[in-house]
Image (cartoon, coloured by chain):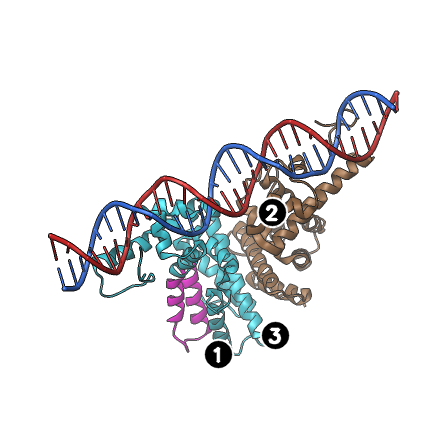
Chain colours: A brown, B cyan, C red, D blue
DNA sequence: ATAAGATGTGAGCAATCGCTCATATTGGCT
DNA sequence: AGCCAATATGAGCGATTGCTCACATCTTAT
């Protein structure tokens, strides 16, 4: 039951009890992330997550209705920065600059927590994400279409398919780099740029 | 009691009993494949596989020491054709022809059973078969390095990394196409070729 | 025919899973 | 202080899992 004194939703004025709840949620999410990174899906159990978070299993189920909901919340937490970075790329700065910034956002996101990024990427396809919660890939895909449309690209062929290919190329390269433990973000960005612009028949920016 | 067991393998001289054993192994592998395709990892249990194969759970464990071993055998069965196709690409036919044939082999493999291919691709990274260089990706990677070396590519940069990028680009595009249910193999081949040759700074073959 | 080995069977065990709920504790209010 | 709501707890339930093993059935050799 929610409190009668506070309407549903976030309130900037946090009582100690509310603060405790926020901390519990944060601890659970971070524990889930660490377990996935260290043990993969095999070690990812609700009991293990609760124990790692230092809270009881009952507390976990007070904030997440089920195991999948916890996964969804973790995906949303991890992709929030990526989506924000991509959303604030200004329009009208040209193909090179726009694609370059999208590549940078993707590489940065991946290199922050490489193992976790790959696992969540995989889960995103399996989960029954509601129509409300749009998949990250779909949002980026639409931005790519807009970027291509502004330049009249591709010269021939389907623009929707081209945008899917650009996204697939980027995800493939970034995930593989993360798996190998690459740490040179700048070099990876240059190679992804070469692949994307090469696919589009353009010269990559210097 | 069971006595000397014959590991799952083909014997040219097949007695009725041996023939039965071969059929059981084949039925189990195919059942595992179908369950993965229809229900994903969630439905992939040894009891479910045995039931779908029309054999008892005991028979399954007579030929596979554990659940992971069954997965490994399935990966080997599914990738055998791909590896054979790639291995028989002749040397000295030029970059365009060699890369083109590798792309064709990959696309054909993926389009045969798209869902299964993606799942097994994912499992290959998790399974403890990484110890040896038995991973499909590693074998293809070495062939890519040889192909690049014969052409003195890339002009600048690390050849090993370039080969990894080519493989990552191909896998990313092919897997994404399979997920979307693409059926036009020829079109997909052309787009992958454009990406790979674009990355290498070459014009894709007509 | 008979024995011996090869192969098949499936009830069921030990372990683990996601999750519930009765209870305990905490913190804010008067 | 006393009260109530919010939050935390963890034993344990029902379901499911990977897998074992005592036994049945089939094949081959003599």
> What residue is rendered at 58% in x and 46% in y?
A45
- Distance from label 2 to label 3 (Cα)? 33 Å
- Distance from label 1 to label 2 (Cα)? 40 Å
Q: First in sequence: mark 3 or mark 1?
A: 1
Is B90 magenta? The answer is: yes
* x and y, in percent, of residue B205 in the image: 46, 67
Q: Do the residues labelled 3 and 1 touch (CB within 8 Å)?
A: no
Is B55 magenta? The answer is: no
Does any portion of residue A122 appear in the rendered image? Answer: yes
- Overall secondary structure of the magenta section: helix
The quadrant of the picture occupied by the N terminus of chain B is bottom left
Q: Do the residues labelled 1 and 2 touch (CB within 8 Å)?
A: no
Tags 1 and 2 on a common chain: no
Q: Which chain carries label 3?
A: B
Which stretch is magenta?
B79-108
Relative height, residue B17 to residue C9 (above, below): below
Q: Is mark 1 on a helix, strand or loop?
A: helix
Q: How many numbered marks does the figure carry?
A: 3
Disc nearest the viewer among 1 and 2: 1
Name the residue tied to disc 1. B150
Does any portion of residue B33 appear in the rendered image? Answer: no
Name the residue tied to disc 2. A142
Name the residue tied to disc 3. B157
Q: Would you say C24 lies left or right of B164 here?
A: right
Q: Is mark 2 on a helix, strand or loop?
A: helix
The quadrant of the picture occupied by the C terminus of chain B is bottom left
Neighbor class of circle 2 (other Cα within 10 Å; few <14, some 14-19, many 20+) is some
* x and y, in percent, of residue A151 in the image: 62, 54
Who is closer to the viewer here, B35 or B63?
B63
Who is closer to the viewer here, B21 or A115?
B21
């Amino acid at each position: 039951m929610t409190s009668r004194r506070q309407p549903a939703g976030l309130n900037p004025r946090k009582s100690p009890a509310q603060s405790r709840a926020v901390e519990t949620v944060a601890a659970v999410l971070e524990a889930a992330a660490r377990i996935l990174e260290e043990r993969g899906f095999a070690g990812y159990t609700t009991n293990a997550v609760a124990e790692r978070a230092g809270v009881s299993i009952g507390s976990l189920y007070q904030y997440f209705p089920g195991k999948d909901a916890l996964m969804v919340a973790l995906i949303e937490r991890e992709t929030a920065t990526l989506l924000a970075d991509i959303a604030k790329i200004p329009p009208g700065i040209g193909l090179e600059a726009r694609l370059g910034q999208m590549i940078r956002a993707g590489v940065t996101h991946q290199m922050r927590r490489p193992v976790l990024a790959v696992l969540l990427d995989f889960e995103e396809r399996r989960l029954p994400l509601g129509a409300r919660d749009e998949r990250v890939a779909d949002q980026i895909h639409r931005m790519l279409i807009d970027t291509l449309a502004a330049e009249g690209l591709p010269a021939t062929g389907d623009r929707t398919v081209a945008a899917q290919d650009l996204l697939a190329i980027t995800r493939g390269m970034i995930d593989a780099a993360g798996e190998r433990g690459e740490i040179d973000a700048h070099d990876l960005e240059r190679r992804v740029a070469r692949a994307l612009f090469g696919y589009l028949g353009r010269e990559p920016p210097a």
